[in-house]
Image: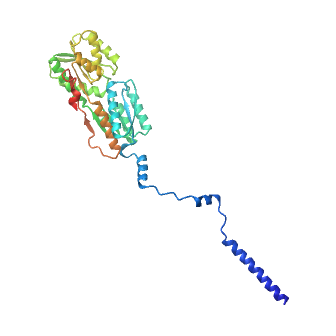
Amino acid sequence: MMKKTLAILLSMCMSAALLCGCGDKVQEPAASNGEEASANQETPAEPEEGEIETEQEETSKGDGESYNFTFVSPLVSHEYWIAVENGIQSGADEQGVNVNVLGDTKVDVDVMVKYIDTAIAAQADGIVTMALSPAAIGPAIDRATAAGIPVVLVDTDAPDSTRAAYVGTSNYDAGFEAGTAMIEATGGNAKIGIIRGTVGQETDNDRIKGFEDAIANEAGMEILTVEACNSDMLTGTQKAQDMLKAYPEMNAIFGSEGTGAVAAGKVLEEQGLSGAITVIGFDDTAECLDYIRSGVVWGTIVQKPDFMGRKAIEILTRINNGEEIEETVIDSGVTLVTKDNVETYKEDAE
């Protein structure tokens, strides 16, 4: 009887122990602080479709809204290049892009190359500049292209480089028109002095060649000398004074860039020679136009710097947007401005 009672008690104890063990396994463990926070946190709402599109637009470079271009100017203080820069800024506003301007107050091709390399290092989305010397600028353009940065040239081309496009004057044709104007102004009888920009500058080379070809069949016309002023007004006036002394027979001056005619005009006005010597220049700076009005300068060949700048930015934006540019050389054209149309030529061009 005792043994049976002990067996029953032992069996009851073992059953209790088993029940306690089973209870431990099914009990939920206490949650940690982080798990409690996770459990209590609301599931974030899915963003609206419109919100997703807006965020993508803000981070995208689509439609040119956040492209960063660089304009490497050959002469930031010159009125003509200020006009080009203004056109570039207008184009930037139209296209919704940003433009950084780099340049010096003196013409120096080595400085221009340095600034192009600066734009490459900054990973600009595009570069606008001019080929002051194609031989020197060309390799820098090629480096930009190799880095995936398109280059659009204005005013002066480097056709043998990898530039994406050129927007500007046909400088040979512009020089030819200046020569034709000189024939008209002098009746085909002129001893001419030429004041150019820098020696070797392709722009001047082409303009002077066009000028020479225009007057080539005129027996009464002769070029006496060609002097470089480096686009500096003080140097230009000194060159004009020197030419007048060295060539007393000189009765005409051709300024093949924006400084020459104005520099000559200053000297002629000071020496009381206004109207005695025929002057034809380039570009419509304020001083040149005033000299045309007063008769000191006979006329000037006017380019379209604003158009060049705006078109260059448009082309860079289109390239960055993935468009293929079919027309890579765009002639912006020129206008001969004389006393007859000095007040209306801008309106006539619109």
Q: Is residue 4 left or right of residue 311?
A: right
Q: Residue 79 location in percent, x, y?
A: 33, 24
The residue lying furthest to the bottom in this view is 1
> In the picture, residue 42 is in which quadrant?
bottom right
Residue at (20% x, 29% y) in the render: 348
Q: Relative to 106, say whether 55 is above or below.
A: below
Q: Quadrant of the N terminus?
A: bottom right
Q: Residue 339 location in percent, x, y?
A: 20, 20
Q: Is residue 160 visible?
A: no
Q: Is residue 294 left or right of residue 9?
A: left
The residue lying furthest to the right in this view is 2
Q: Relative to 14, say whether 170 is above or below.
A: above
Residue at (32% x, 43% y) in the render: 318
- Total count of labels: 0
Q: Is residue 202 visible?
A: yes
Q: Quadrant of the C terminus?
A: top left
> In the picture, residue 304 is in which quadrant?
top left
Residue at (69% x, 74% y) in the render: 23
Q: Residue 226 location in percent, x, y?
A: 27, 19
Q: How is the image coloured?
A: rainbow
Q: Is residue 206 left or right of residue 8?
A: left
Q: Relative to 41, say whether 149 is above or below.
A: above
